[in-house]
Amino acid sequence: MIRATQDNEYVELTSPTQLPKASGFLWNEKMMIHVNCRGYAVAQFMQPEPAKYSYAPNLEAKTFMQPEQPYYAHHPGRFLYVKDEETGEIFSAPYEPVRVLPDQYTFAVGKHHIVWKLEHLGFAVEMTLSLPKDEAMELWRVKVKNLSDRKRKLSIYPYFTVGYMSWMNQSAEYHEELQGMVCSAITPYQKYQDYAKIKQLKDKTFLLADQPPRAWEASQEAFEGEGGIGMPSAVQQEELSKGDARYEMPLCVLQYSLELTPGEDKLYRFIFGPAKTEEEIAQIRQQYFLNAASGSEDGFAAAEREYAGYIQEGKGCIEIKTPDPELDNFVNHWLPRQMYYHGQTNRLTTDPQTRNYLQDNMGMSYIKPQMARNAFLTALSQQNASGAMPDGIILHEAAELKYINQVPHMDHCVWLPICLSTYLDETNDYTILEEEVAFAGGEEMATVYEHINRAMFWLMEATDERGLNYIDQGDWCDPMNMVGYKGKGVSGWLTMASAYAFMIWADICATSGRPEMSRKLAAAADEANVVINQYLWDGNWYARGITDDNVVFGISKDTEGRIFINPQGWALLCGAADASKQEKLMRAVKEQLETPYGLEKLAPSYTAMREDVGRVTQKHPGTAENGAVYNHAAAFYIYALYAVGEPNDAYRLLRKMIPGPDPEDLIRRGQLPVFIPNYYRGAYRQFPRTAGRSSHLFNTGTVPWVYRCLIDGLFGVQGNEEGIRIHPQLPAHWEEASVKRSFRGAELHVAMKREAGVTAVEVYVNGSRIEDGIIKNVEAGRVYDVLVKLPPQ
Ligand code: CEZ
């Protein structure tokens, strides 16, 4: 039902109904497309703000990408109606909108393309989606084959949703000379000042075909007639009416009629996307379909090939082999791909949230460190001279802070040293600290070192008389907006995160020859830890914060939101929790927050508004920050477990982030193991029926943290200023594992084995024992054979 192909190139699903929301996604420099097994699609492109070219049937609100995206009959999709011309029978690929269950069905999610294959009525249909590397457009291959032993006649109708483009102006028609359809619209606006902006937009949607169609239809209504989208009247007629759309909802559908001898197949190719002008569309047709560059390869095939190469560049820096092949496949292929997507696209925003931008680039440190470096400098160039970081980082001159970035959050500074430390671990590039960068406004310049000092001092100052950090309208938890909006409430988590940031910065200062500053920071961390224990320890775990009215919350006497995961994990990281507190809080987490699908972010989920906590309590219980298995928060906790040396709990929880391999688990999550979603439904103890269900939202800060869990924790192959420290923390039930680690231009082949008689980790490099486990002065171009002997369990 769900399997990886032999070569691990694809994850395949063989039913369109068992996991109806199963999906995959592709992206390039300009766009992203998320498609599901039944043919529905959400595509966005940047111009520079995210825009659509295939719309819903009603006016769409512009907002950020949503979890648990609902699908419905007229949801934008890419379909192929197939009509047997002898019997009149009709079905559609991949499954929607006709919903006839085919005899054979496969949805294959690959890294650089996505394929739907089905067999029905003696026909095989294959639809393949790919993208070019730099342009916003979809490249489609549609192949039909006669599987029967007689000649067959059929019509196929490639259908591309255009939808409700605009209430001001929308139309569509077929263009003979383009051999394609062009839909035109004007993005709705009202202020004359916006005219200058909207006149630049790509307001056309086109469909180009490599072969002339027999007929077409450009009006959604005319196409559907009384039959509706499930059995369109136009498909039941002999020929589409070659109609246009005049302020009618546009559609791109073509008809091809063909005859196939037994075993014969035929391939069609299409390009679907946005454009500004007809000339641009003509240009695309020329480039992709008419210019056969060399031999048989035309622009279309060259673009597919180039795109495969682009995705291939997003390789991670470890290749693992463990007793868990599904984990191996995920870590070797899908996890770095998802991390790369974040680093390359900035989640399709022009003003990524500062914490997201920094963490996404923490992940990029493993893939393209130069890009991470530039991103850190970009972020710092928007820092206020006071040390405060803005809520979002502006990536385009015309961009402005939108949505959540208009709400003041207090945590952005903590991510600077934390994310930079990963970059330094990977590259050892301490020169970044000496780089001169301006502050916002451009008047004052300072080194990166000075910038981060100011961020740390800003955090030290942003505390109340007790020394706890103010939360204002939020911290890492975006919607925790009413704990401190009156100016008094504090965040327990943020106090811990600040302490941890001070510790990390203290280390970096020490390593870069700044002992004085290092001591100052370490002292600040110690002071924070004292007040954390004084005001936030509740007996068995740490509180989440203290409200404007001085009410401690996230504690045993709360009936909802009794325990939050973040203060527990970060108390382990920042060193606030001593051994006895560590044990207590880990037990509380296991008892109250662990579920079969991972760790809940808080429990019990709030079922009613708490006006002194805020919007988070109004989210549906068990979704998102209100007690879902929020993977980003779970990843922090797992990272903390590795930091305090709890490999078994850490691994168990880590494994729960990936759907499967057990079929029941896959069905419950409803998602293929090709990405980690931002959440799985939680509130396991309150709403067990829906627990485990994936949000299908692949935008999440989880992935770089999972990668860090693997590098710094599980496989213990973390870089440092001397070289690389080998210190695996395999779970007890693993006898062995191996890792191929690319590191600063060298390659390490690390074999890990449990061996009788071994009492502590022993590391051998090219045959000789290394006492401290640190391979020093790693030389680029060299291959290191590393053997790690581990004590038996
Ligand atoms: O967004 C994420 C943010 O992108 O939520 C995280 C936060 O740390 C990330 O920076 C936790 O709050 O209600 C809201 O505004 C939500 O908070 C969303 O914006 C949330 C979504 O899950 C999107 O990923």
Image (cartoon, grey):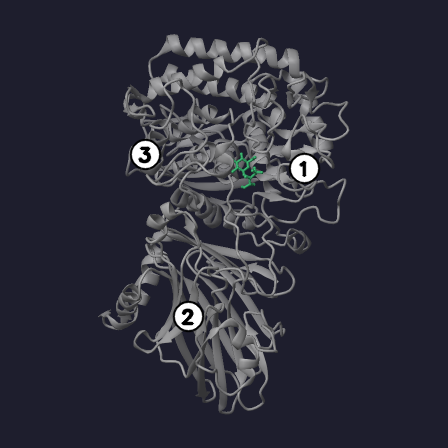
Percent position (x, y) of residue 436? Answer: 27, 23
Q: What residue lies at 51% left-to-right and 13% top-to-bottom?
A: 525
Q: Nearer the viewer, mark 1 or mark 2?
A: 2
- Which kind of residue does numbered mark 2 sit on? Ala
Answer few, some or many: residues within 10 Å of disc 1's Cα (few below 14, many 20 plus, some between 14 and 19): some
Residue 541 position by quadrant: top right
Residue position for label 3: 374
Which of disc 3 and disc 2 is earlier in sequence? 2
Q: CA distance from mark 1 to mark 2?
A: 43 Å
Which of disc 3 and disc 1 is earlier in sequence? 3
Question: What kind of element bears circle 3?
Answer: helix
Answer few, some or many: residues within 10 Å of disc 3's Cα (few below 14, many 20 plus, some between 14 and 19): few
Residue 641 position by quadrant: top right
Residue 151 seen: yes
Percent position (x, y) of residue 146? Answer: 49, 84
Camera-nearest residue between 480 and 539 = 480
Residue position for label 1: 618
Above-or-below relation of 133 to 84? above
Considering every residue shown, the one lying at the far left of the view is 294
Residue position for label 2: 172
Asked whether the residues under the numbered discs 2 and 3 touch, taking CB atoms below 8 Å apart as contact, a structural biologist would say: no
- Which kind of residue does numbered mark 1 sit on? Gln
- Which kind of residue does numbered mark 3 sit on? Asn
Ligand 1 under 8 Å from disc 3 Cβ: no
Camera-nearest residue between 244 and 502 = 244
Which of disc 2 and disc 1 is earlier in sequence? 2
- Quarter, ligand 1: top right
Percent position (x, y) of residue 17? Answer: 64, 64
Q: What residue lies at 28% left-to-right and 24% top-to-bottom?
A: 435
Camera-nearest residue between 242 and 73 = 242
Q: Nearer the viewer, mark 1 or mark 3?
A: 1
Locate the C terminus by quadrant.
Answer: top right
